[in-house]
Image (cartoon, helix red, strand yellow):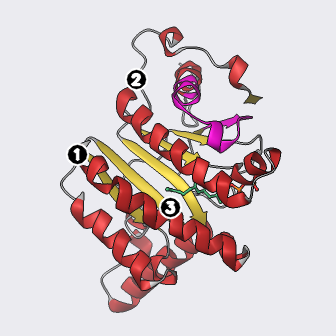
Amino acid sequence: MAFGKQDLQPLASAPVGAQPPQHVAVIMDGNGRWAAARGLPRVAGHRAGTQAVRRTIEAAIEAGVGWLTLYAFSSENWRRPAEEVMELTGLLRHFIRQELAELSREGVRVRVLGDRARFEPDTRAELDRAERTTLGNTRLNLNIALSYGARDEIAAAARAAAQAALDGTLDPAALTVERFERFLSTAGMPDPDLMIRTSGEHRLSNFLLWQSAYAELIFLDVLWPDFGPAEFNGALVEFARRERRFGARPA
Ligand code: FPP
């Protein structure tokens, strides 16, 4: 169900004793439409989207969410015009340079999911630095999905498992769901409990397909640059109202 800002309830109306989701994943969509609606170039939407990223990180920390995964650049986004790709990677580098010290002070641990080898060396260096600098932080685990595609991730995991079987370190008959997950880029991380997508589109767009098997999905009509604490907390309220059964029958 999609709902707009007007439908979002304040956090105070979450059921008593409701726990926040441990892991929230977000498909940040609508930067281009936000810019077009204002007669601005697309990059202005991405720039405004960066501010929404900052607000969302703060809201996640405030709410006690332990894991936040943001879909910042998909493996398909490389097909966008070179100028937009350059602008997006430039914004990302700028974001890390500007925000890294503050994120680290706030206890945020940054990890990058996806094929970072496709980025220029200076961008890769910034990403490595962000991961290294924040390694010891535990308050919020922030995953930034970059050049990420779930099918690529699952295929790479299958290749690694097949190689381990060839090397004799893995018995194919013993390749359970749990063992297979160790080959994914999210090995050791909790699965997302809640997946939010902005901009009114109802798709997963190749994001965390394996990991979201039991995620609650919330689609919001708001465009990503307009996303903030009210929308984030509203999604947490909606999440708290959902009954999660993980395939089991109600008691
Ligand atoms: C989708 O909007 C958004 C993206 C492809 C990029 C998301 C990037 C940011 C929010 C900024 C940088 C990120 C970080 C982590 C600092 P769209 O361009 O597809 O919008 P449209 O569907 O309206 O055209």
| Residue 234 inside the magenta-drawn segment | yes
Q: CA distance from mark 3 to mark 1?
A: 22 Å
Position above or below: 169 against 18 = below
The percent coordinates of residue 198 (x first, y second) are 68, 41
User: What amino acid is at disc 3?
Assistant: Ala
Q: Quadrant of ligand 1?
A: bottom right
Seen from the viewer's position, the closer of residues 34 and 69 is 34
Q: Can residue 212 be seen at all in this image of the molecule?
A: no
From this viewpoint, which residue is outermost toward the front? 39
Q: Which mark lies nearer to you, 3 or 2?
A: 3
Query: Residue at horizontal 58%, vertical 64%?
Result: 73
Circle 2 is placed at which residue position? 19
Position of the N terminus by quadrant: top right
Asked whether the residues under the numbered discs 1 and 2 touch, taking CB atoms below 8 Å apart as contact, a structural biologist would say no
Circle 1 is placed at which residue position? 105
Residue 185 in the figure: left or right of residue 129: right
Of labels 3 and 2, earlier in sequence is 2
Q: Secondary structure at mark 3?
A: strand
Circle 3 is placed at which residue position? 145
Label 1, ligand 1: CB separation under 8 Å? no
Q: CA distance from mark 1 to mark 2?
A: 25 Å
User: What amino acid is at disc 1?
Assistant: Arg
Residue stretch in magenta: 217-235
Give residue 224's mark.
Answer: none
Q: Which mark lies nearer to you, 1 or 2?
A: 1
The percent coordinates of residue 125 (x first, y second) are 35, 77
* Mark 2, other Cα within 10 Å: few <14 / some 14–19 / many ≥20: some
